[in-house]
Amino acid sequence: MATDCAFARLDDVIRGKLRQRVPSWVPEIVLETAMKCTPIFSEMLYGYDMSQVNPEESVSLGGRFPFLIRVAPFSFVACLRVGFAQVKNHSLPLFIIHSEDDELIPVEHAYRIFNNASTAEVDKEMWIIPDTNHIGGYFVDQKYYSDRISNFLERSFAERERRELPKLKELQKTTAEEAAALDATIQMIEKEAATTDAE
């Protein structure tokens, strides 16, 4: 999976934007009340509670990625669907890209997601693109950007295959042994049926 300028939590982004745009004389309790009401309206208008759109927590749980469907239209460049496998140490590769000067989603969100991901270290990488604003890295050098994502995914899946190969060979061996045992059982049943028919 590759992300570009993803937020760690949607409600953190909204809270930050409210603080930037609301005059300083407005009491903090008004902002907090607005934040408490926002999930209710998002549930009514869009069918989900925005506080549940939480990639930072999802990647740390060692579980599945329930937020992908909701977040994908906003921040995911690529999401390779590998059965939404468990994250813990044999998880989806995670490539976090973020623009250093992002004013919409501050770069600290990338660090939060990266640091909280329970993805194995060998399967995750972060690329902070200097002197760019929100999702600006792609437009700096489209070929390099695309190649960097492709190279990460190819390397990650090759490493995964290398790690998983012994398990697959063991499974193949077990499957072959089970198939041989099943064939022997079938032959024995057929022999007994033939003997019974002959009598």
Image: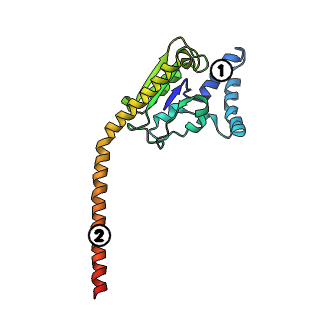
Q: How is the image coloured?
A: rainbow
Tell me, for residue 17, which label it has, or none. 1
Amino acid identity at mark 2? Thr
Q: Is residue 60 visible?
A: yes
Drawn side of residue 104 relative to residue 78, left or right: right
Choose top left, top right, bottom left or bottom right for residue 39.
top right
Q: Quadrant of the C terminus?
A: bottom left
Residue 78: x %, y % from top left: 52, 31
Q: Is residue 107 visible?
A: no
User: SS of the residue at dot 1?
Assistant: helix
Tell me, for residue 180, which label it has, or none. none
Q: Earlier in the sequence, mark 2 or mark 1?
A: 1
Choose top left, top right, bottom left or bottom right for residue 136.
top right
Amino acid identity at mark 1? Lys
Disc 2 target residue: 185
In the depicted structure, whether residue 190 falls above or below residue 198? above
Residue 128: x %, y % from top left: 48, 18
User: SS of the residue at dot 2?
Assistant: helix
In front of the other: 123 or 161: 161
The residue positioned 41% from the left and 33% from the top of the image is: 119
